[in-house]
Image: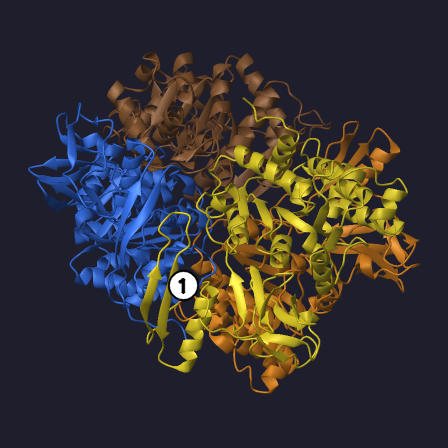
Chain colours: A orange, B yellow, C brown, D blue
Amino acid sequence: MDFDGASYSIDEVLPGAHVDEESYARLTVEAASAADLERLLDNLREAGAVPVVDADAVTQPAPGDGVLPEDFYATTNYVTEVRIGGVWRRVENPEMDCAIVIDAALPRTVAPSDVRGGDAIVVGHTGVKVDRPQRSRRRAVFEFMSSTVSSEKPKEQLIVEVARELRRTLQDGKRVVVVGGPAIVHTGAARYLAELIREGYVNALFAGNALALHDIEAQLFGTSLGVRLSDAFPVEEGHSHHLRAVNRIRALGGIKNAMLQGILRGGIMYEAYKADIPVVLAGSIRDDGPLPEVITDVIEAQRAMREWVPQIGMAIMVCTLLHSIAVGNLLPASCKTICVDINPASVTKLTDRGSTQTIGLVMDAAGFLRELRQALHGEAPAP
Amino acid sequence: MDFDGASYSIDEVLPGAHVDEESYARLTVEAASAADLERLLDNLREAGAVPVVDADAVTQPAPGDGVLPEDFYATTNYVTEVRIGGVWRRVENPEMDCAIVIDAALPRTVAPSDVRGGDAIVVGHTGVKVDRPQRSRRRAVFEFMSSTVSSEKPKEQLIVEVARELRRTLQDGKRVVVVGGPAIVHTGAARYLAELIREGYVNALFAGNALALHDIEAQLFGTSLGVRLSDAFPVEEGHSHHLRAVNRIRALGGIKNAMLQGILRGGIMYEAYKADIPVVLAGSIRDDGPLPEVITDVIEAQRAMREWVPQIGMAIMVCTLLHSIAVGNLLPASCKTICVDINPASVTKLTDRGSTQTIGLVMDAAGFLRELRQALHGEAPAP
Amino acid sequence: MDFDGASYSIDEVLPGAHVDEESYARLTVEAASAADLERLLDNLREAGAVPVVDADAVTQPAPGDGVLPEDFYATTNYVTEVRIGGVWRRVENPEMDCAIVIDAALPRTVAPSDVRGGDAIVVGHTGVKVDRPQRSRRRAVFEFMSSTVSSEKPKEQLIVEVARELRRTLQDGKRVVVVGGPAIVHTGAARYLAELIREGYVNALFAGNALALHDIEAQLFGTSLGVRLSDAFPVEEGHSHHLRAVNRIRALGGIKNAMLQGILRGGIMYEAYKADIPVVLAGSIRDDGPLPEVITDVIEAQRAMREWVPQIGMAIMVCTLLHSIAVGNLLPASCKTICVDINPASVTKLTDRGSTQTIGLVMDAAGFLRELRQALHGEAPAP
Amino acid sequence: MDFDGASYSIDEVLPGAHVDEESYARLTVEAASAADLERLLDNLREAGAVPVVDADAVTQPAPGDGVLPEDFYATTNYVTEVRIGGVWRRVENPEMDCAIVIDAALPRTVAPSDVRGGDAIVVGHTGVKVDRPQRSRRRAVFEFMSSTVSSEKPKEQLIVEVARELRRTLQDGKRVVVVGGPAIVHTGAARYLAELIREGYVNALFAGNALALHDIEAQLFGTSLGVRLSDAFPVEEGHSHHLRAVNRIRALGGIKNAMLQGILRGGIMYEAYKADIPVVLAGSIRDDGPLPEVITDVIEAQRAMREWVPQIGMAIMVCTLLHSIAVGNLLPASCKTICVDINPASVTKLTDRGSTQTIGLVMDAAGFLRELRQALHGEAPAP
C-alpha cells in the first residue's frame, strides 16, 4: 500500500503486557481526499482493523444473468463475515474470486457465471470483514512449510506429518480429495493410489480424462502412453493403446459399466467407482476420446466439483498444474493442501496463493504416494 | 521392434550407384506364426516397404456413435494413403490419434467423438501406407533444430529464419496461427502480438480465456493479474481487476461488442476481432468468468479449431503447454511449428512429437515476440 | 524463534505519533535458564534491540592457522558494529560466513582459511550489533522485486531501472561487475557484453574458464561449443574447437598475450584486457585446459575476488549458478545485485539469500544483455 | 556432414544374407579438393570404415609443457586404436577431449595440462580408428534409456535393473563410484548412502566440500544447512552450523582424524574413511572452509580422480551437475552411468554426451537411494 497524502496519529495503545494477552490500539487516520480515505479504510478493514463506527453491507441488484454490478465485492478464500441488519453473518462457503449474494438475509458466495439477474450482490467493502489467519507463535508444520518450496528438503518426516493430518481429517468426518494427473500412472504409482482409495484413506477424486484413461490403459494393456509399466520399455503399437482403451470403454457405455461388467478389474478408477466416492473428471482441450464420464463443459465441471467442496478437509494435489489450480480456486483457505510435483515452478505456483495451510513437495508422484502409503500403514522410514 | 522368431534373406540388392539414384532391395521374410508375420509386415509397411502383392484397405462399420471397431487403424499425422478399389487415395486431413473413415470411396480422418454408427472405418494395416518424411541430405533449419532443445543456443538468427518462413507461409496463401498463453500479457508482450496481427503477419488466434482476459484487463486497467505493466509493481486491489474486466465484457455481451462499442480500443483481442481473423477461445477448468466468446465445451472447442486446420501453414506456440498440445494434436506433421516457452520441459514435450518441422526455443515470450517483430520489419539484430 | 520458558512484559511504549517519527519501547524479558536468556538476548540483538546495559565484544585467540575458537561469532553480510573499549566500531568489510578479528582495536572480517593462530577472534554475540535493513515505507524497485521470482513478469521497464541504477553506481565511483557463464557466448550475447565493457558500463569481470574459452573459440572459429553462432548449426569437427582454442592461447602464453600479439582481436576477454579492468577467472573441476589466466586453486581465486569487493557497487550475475553463489558469498548485503538465468530455480537460489537489494530475472542471457544495452543507450523499448 | 563436391560409387555389395552375418561393401569416393577428401576420409574413418590402404599415425612433438601441436588429434571417450609400426594398438585409457601421446610404441591419452614439451603427440586422423558402439538388435535397459529423459517414467523397475547391473559390476571386480552433491544430505538420504558404503555396494566416492560438510554437520548438529533433518524445521542459529562443523574438523586436522578420534561416529564420510575406499573431494569456488581433505586446486583434483578411473565400472551421479560433468569427462564411454537429479535439464545435460551406457532418472536423491538400497537388499517394490 502506498498512501501519499495519508497521515495517522496514535490516540491510545494498550499492549497486552504478557505473551498471551491481546493488544489494543486506537488510531485516527486522515487522507487527501474522500476517495483516498475510502481506499485506506478498505485496506485497514482487510488488515483486520474495526472501524469505531461501522455499517451494514450495501447491495445492488445484478443487472443480468452472469453479470455483476460494476463495484461488486470480490471475495478472498478466507473466513468472511457480512453485516446484515446490524448482525455479522458468516459467509458459508468462502471461495476466492466470487461475489457475495445476500439471500434470505444470509450471505453466500456465488460464481460470476451462476449469478442471476436481480440477485442482491454486495458492493464495496462496507460491512464486510475478513479474518485473515494470524501467524500463531508456535508454528505447525503446515504453516511453516508454506513459506518455502525447495527440492532439497528432507521429506520423509514431512510425509509422516501429512499422514497424521490425513487421519485427523478423516476422524473429523471430512473428505480427503486427491487431485491427480496422468504422471501418477506413468510413474507406476497407480497401484498406491488405488490402494489408498480401497483402504478409505482417499475418499474423493478430482481428475481429468488423462489420469482415468492411462489408468484404464494400464489395466487393459499393461502400458501407460504405450510404455510397459513392468520394465519401462515402449511397446510395439503401444502409442495407440490409450485410443483403444477409450474406445473400448465408450463401447461399454462408461468406466462404471466396464467395472460392473467385469472388464475393468483393478486400478484407480475401478477402486473409486467400487468405493462409490465422489469422482469428478473434468474435460480439457487436449483430451483424447474422451471417456463417457468426463464432463466436457468446463463450467459444468467446476459446478460438479464445487458441490463437494464443503465436505473436503484435505486436498492432495499430485502432478497436475491445471486441475490443481482449478480445485485450489474452489477451496477455502482453511483447507489443508499438499502439492506434489517434480517441477518446482508448479509447486511454487500452487503454494504461492495466500494460504497458510499449504505444503509443497518437489518430488515424483510415485515416491510421494509410496511413502504416504508406508506412513499410513505405520511403517517407519528405513533405519 | 523385437522379432524373436523372425528371419530374413536378401534376394536382390540394386543400390543406386550414385548419390542421386534410388536403391532397390527385395527381401524374403519369415516369422514364427501368422500373427507375428502380420505384425512384422505392418512394421515394414510403416517403414516404407511395399509388399510385392498388396491389397485394398479393409473396413468395418462403426458399432455406434462415438464408438470404433476394436481393431481400427489409429492414424499418425503424416501423409497417409489408403488403397481403395486398387487405387491409392491420399487422406485429405492427416491428424494423429484419429480413425480413417471411407466415405464415397475417399478416405478422411475422423475424431473418435465424431464417428457415427455404421461409418466404414479402416481396420488393421492392410492397404494403408504412411509417407514418413525422409531426412533430406541438406538440412533445413526446421529439420535440424527439431532434434535438440536447449536454452543455450544462439536465437537471433533462428528467429530471422522463422520470420523468413513466416513470410513464405503467407505468400503460399496459408494462415499463421498463434497459440498463446497469458504470459504474453504478463511479460508485457501483448503490444508486439497486437502489432503482428494488425500488420497481417498473424492471421489466426487460438487461445484460452486467460490470454483474452488479461489482455483486456491490461487495456481497461493497465495491469495484468494486478501487476502494473508499466513498472511491474502490484497495484492496490489489482487482484480483482481481471474479475472486473470479465464482468464488464459480460455486461457488454462479449469482446467483439466491447470493441464495436468503443470500450475496448486496443490490444490483442481488439486487433484480432478488428482484422476479423479466425479466433478460437477454448475453455479450461481453471477459467474465471469466462468471457462470452469462450467455448466452454472442450470437444466443441476442438471442432472449432479443427475447422481452420486445413488453412494453417505455420503455428507459433507461445507459453501455453495446454493449448499448444491441444493444437499440436490437430495439425498435420507437415505444418511448420515453433514452440516458445521459458520452461525447457514444456518445449521438449511439445517438440518431441515426431514432427521434423518443429523448432523449440527456450526463452521468454516478450523477447521472442519483440525479436520476431524486428525480424519481420527487416531490422537487423544489433551490430 | 521458539522460546518455551520465555515471557516478557512491556514496561513502556512511546509510539512515534506520526508517520515520520521513531517509536520507542522498553521490555523486560525472562527466560527459563541463563543459557536460554543468552540465546534470547542474542536474538533480540540481531533483531535490532539494544540492551539497557551493554558490554564490549569478547575475543579468544585463534588456536591455530585456519582454525577459529569453537564459539566464534559467524558473520552476516549486513552492516555490523563491534563494541571495542566502549566504542562501537563498524566492521569495514562485511562478508557472510566469516569470523571477526580485532586488529589494532579495529574489527574486520576474516575468512576461516585466512585466520592466523593467535588472532583475536570475536566469540559469542556480546558487543556485536547488526543493522538489518529496515523495509522503507516507499518501496524502491530493488526492494520490491527481491520478494518474488517469476518468469511471468514484465521485464522491459525493470531493465530500464537496472540501467538507471547502473549509471548511478558508476557516478558514485563504484565498479559494476559482471559475473558470467558460458551461456552468454552460446546464446550469441558475447558482443553485447563486449560492447558494455568497451563503453565502460561494466568495469570488472568475474568468470570461469568456460566463459573465456568459448568467447575465444567464437573469435577464432566463429563457434561456441562447436555450434556456429551465425546460424546455430553444429560445425564439422566443431566439438574440438574449444580444445584447439585453449591450446592456441596456452601456446601464446595467455589471453593477454594473444591480445597484445594481435591474434585475439575482439570479444569479451579482448575488451576486458584492453580496458585493463579487474578480471578474475576462477577454476572449476570441469575445466578443459584451462587457460593460463585461470586461477586453479579455488581458495586463491576467492582471495583474488575478495580484493576487489570493496570497489564493487553493483553485481550483474548472468547464467552461472556456481560463480554467482561464490561471488554472492563475498558481497555485502548493500551491494545491488541482479541475477539473470533462464532457470527459475537458479534465480530463486540466488535471490533467496537475505538481501533486499537483489533483483531476479528469469530470462535468457542474450535477451537481458541486449535490452540492458538498449536501455543504457537511451533507446526506448519498442512502442 | 555436408560434402558439396563429394560423390561416391558403390563398387561391390555383399550383404550378409541372414540376420547374423556381417555385410561388406566397397565404395569409391571422390571430393572436390585434397582437403575435402581428407575431411571426408576422416569422417568415414570415424564412422567405422577402413581405408583399403591405411597408414601409421603421424606424430609431432609437443612444442612445450601443457602445449599441443596445432593439429593434435582430439580424443573421444570411445575405444580407440592407433596404428603404430603397422600394428593397431588400443589406447589404454580412453578419455574425451584429450590428446594421444605415443610412448614406448604404445598410445595413451594425455590431458592438455599434463603434456610435456617434446611428447610425441598424434596429429590428424591418419592411423586412428574409433570403435563407435553398434546398436545391438536386442536392446538392453542401458541402451534404451539413454535416449529419453522424462520425469514421467516408471522408475521402480529401472532401479531394480540398476541394482542388478551394480552387483554385476562388483562381481567383475570393478568399482562403483558415487558422485554426489549436498542434496543427498539435505533430503535426508545420507543414511542410505552411508549404508551402501558400509555394505560394500559403493566403493569409491567423488564429491565436493559441500557433501562432506553437510554430512558432518548432520552428524555433529543434526541439521543440514541449518534445517533439522528429523522434522525439516530450521534451527535457531542453524545457519552457522556448517561453519562450526568445518571449523571443528579443521581443528582436529581433518575428517579422517575426526573419525579416528571418535568425534565423527557415523554418516557418509565416516563410512567412506572407515571402509578405506577411494575418496576424492574436489574444491569449488563457492566452498566454505574448506575441509582439510578437499583438494583446492582443480587440476590436481582432476588428476586425483583420473587415477581411479581405470578401476571404475559404474558411476552413480546424484544431484550434482558440477561434479557429474567433471567425472563424466574423465570416464570412458563403456562405463555404465546413472544420472539422478530432480532437474530434468541437469539430467539431459549429463545423459546427452554421446554415451549409450547412460540412464537418466528425474527424481529426488532420497527416493532414488532408498529404492536402490531396497533393490539391493532384495526387497521387492510394494505389491
* C94 to A64, vertically: above or below: above
Percent x, y of residue B346 = 54, 50
Q: Is residue A56 visible?
A: no
Q: Residue furthest bottom?
A: A261
Percent x, y of residue A309 = 70, 66
Q: Is residue B201 visible?
A: yes
Q: Which residue is labeled 1 in the image?
A: D155
In the foreground, D245 or A77: A77
Instruction: Identify the residue shown where x is 52% and y is 80%.
Output: A266
In the foreground, A41 or C17: A41
Q: Secondary structure at mark 1?
A: loop
Percent x, y of residue B167 = 65, 38
Q: Is residue D177 left or right of residue A271?
A: left
In the foreground, D98 or C371: D98
Percent x, y of residue C210 = 36, 31
Q: Which quadrant is the C terminus of chain B positioned in?
A: top right
Q: Chain of mark 1?
A: D
* A200 to A4, vertically: above or below: below
* C171 to C25, vertically: above or below: above
Q: Which quadrant is the N terminus of chain B positioned in?
A: bottom left
* Location of residue D159 (image quadrant): bottom left
Crowd around label 1: few <14 · some 14–19 · many ≥20 (10 Å): many
Instruction: Identify the residue shown where x is 35% and y is 56%.
Output: B15
* Location of residue D166 (image quadrant): bottom left
Amino acid of disc 1: Lys
* Location of residue A270 (image quadrant): bottom right
